[in-house]
Image (cartoon, rainbow, N blue to C red):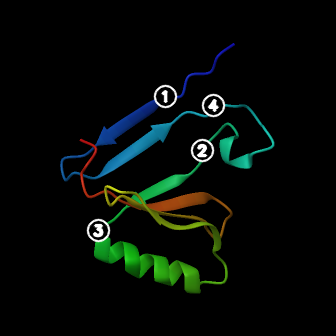
Amino acid sequence: MTTVRVHIFLQFADGSMIEFVTATDDKTADVEKQAGIRHLAFSVTPAAFDEIVAKLKADERVEEVHDVSENAKGLKTYWYRDIEGNFSHLIYRPEPLM
């Protein structure tokens, strides 16, 4: 059986958006791919991105998962586990998805 990854975007009038992504595996050794809510993503401005990353890195309760990365198009992400153990990431997209 092949599992298909599905992305669903819910965009609001102010441009904010919620993205839902289905799991590709059911309870594998890679906990980032377990069924259920995989992670929360927060889209921010470039100035807010740098400010929030600095605050998260300074908070001993927050666990860094992947340091800041930036692709050739300027998209930036920072992955971390929040104080409740949830996977989350900040994202800055120079070009909106929609």
Secondary structure of the residue carrying numbered label 2: loop
Whether residue 76 is situated above or below residue 15 in the rendered picture: below
Going 63% across and 31% down the picture, which residue do you hit? 24
Image mark for residue 24: 4
Whether residue 5 is situated above or below residue 67 in the rendered picture: above
Marks 3/4: CA–CA distance: 30 Å
Residue hosting label 1? 6
Image mark for residue 45: 3
Label 1: few (<14), some (14–19) or many (≥20) C-alpha neighbours in 10 Å: few
Residue hosting label 2? 37
Image mark for residue 82: none
Marks 4/1: CA–CA distance: 9 Å
Marks 2/3: CA–CA distance: 24 Å
Going 78% across and 38% down the picture, which residue do you hit? 28
Label 2: few (<14), some (14–19) or many (≥20) C-alpha neighbours in 10 Å: some
Residue kind at label 1, given as amino acid type: Val
Whether residue 41 is situated above or below residue 98 in the rendered picture: below
Secondary structure of the residue carrying numbered label 1: loop
Marks 1/2: CA–CA distance: 13 Å
Marks 3/1: CA–CA distance: 26 Å
Asked whether 96 or 81 is in front, the reply is 96
Residue kind at label 2, given as amino acid type: Ile
**In terms of sequence position, does the residue under pointer 2 or pointer 4 come before the other?**
4
Whether residue 59 is situated above or below residue 86 in the rendered picture: below
Secondary structure of the residue carrying numbered label 3: loop
Question: Do callouts 1 and 2 mark residues in contact (Cβ within 8 Å)?
Answer: no
Label 4: few (<14), some (14–19) or many (≥20) C-alpha neighbours in 10 Å: some
Q: Nearer the viewer, mark 2 or mark 4?
A: 4
Question: Do callouts 2 and 3 mark residues in contact (Cβ within 8 Å)?
Answer: no
- Pinpoint residue 14: horizontal percent, then vertical percent: 19, 53
